Amino acid sequence: MWIFYTPDVSDEFELPEEEAAHCLRVLRMKEGDELLLADGKGCFHKAVISASTSKRCWVRVLESNRQEPLWKGHLHIAVAPTKLMDRNEWFVEKAVEIGVDEITFLLTEHSERDVMKMERIQKIAVSAMKQSKKSWLPVLNGMTKFAQFIAGCKEQDRFIAHCEPGQEKLHLMSLVEPGHDAVVLIGPEGDFSPQEIELALASGFRPVSLGPSRLRTETAALAAVHMMNLKNTVE
């Protein structure tokens, strides 16, 4: 059954314009056809098309079911986006498919990009949510200054993956505690500055390794998401 994203659900309502176009023009669905709605807040809603025109579609909800959490804790990745947008988009798509609760884009001293088109990122996240059959849409935060992010961070477990030598770094997989809210910071291609690393460490972040290979920013971010998810997956 096809999944459609509808953040605002009531007993009977009109599908968002983009979802209606996909339903009616692409899939050629019609009155009486059943479909599955994901509200992005943890619920699936089985519905039926009650009325339609060439461009508009109304549905009636038949039943609602809450999706059980697929992993424990609140998993948050904060990453300095790369210069090339297609890499950032690839990361968001794959991170949502694997499973993450929150993504923040960081503005750091060595950032290659200081603006993110969040409307496009939101669409990619929604598509990945539907593709991976989830009803939870991660929180997506636009560009946030590094110091501001550090000051407002509330996660129980805090990690920073950086490349500066001279510090002992344990592997992230060995430090993630199942069920704990966790955040991992991933820097730009030029890494975090020494001052940023010092600020993070002074604020309770622990330095971590993601393995022996030197990874691109988007690869490192996705590896961190996967590791957090693996340690928190509910069997």
Image (spheres, helix red, strand yellow):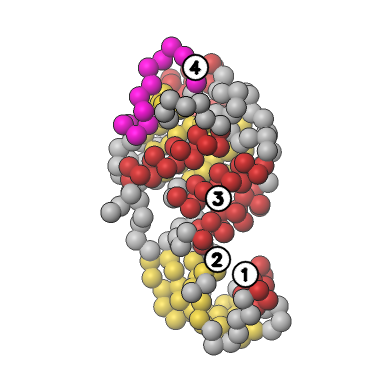
The image shows residue 227, relative to residue 138, as above or below, that is above
Residue at numbered disc 4: 164
Circle 3/circle 4 CB separation < 8 Å: no
Whole-number angstrom distance, CA of label 1 to CA of label 4? 46 Å
Circle 2/circle 3 CB separation < 8 Å: no
Q: Specify whether residue 106 is in view.
A: no
Earlier residue among tags 1 and 3: 1
Earlier residue among tags 3 and 4: 3
Whole-number angstrom distance, CA of label 1 to CA of label 3? 19 Å
Residue sitting farthest toward the front: 213
The residue under the point 36% across, 55% down is: 70
Label of residue 118 in the image:
none
Whole-number angstrom distance, CA of label 1 to CA of label 2? 7 Å
Callout 4: SS: loop
In magenta, the rendered stretch is: 163-175
Whole-number angstrom distance, CA of label 2 to CA of label 3? 16 Å
Residue type at mark 3 is Glu
Residue type at mark 4 is Glu
Question: Is 235 covered by the magenta stretch?
Answer: no
Residue at numbered disc 3: 93
In-front residue for pair 24/7 = 24
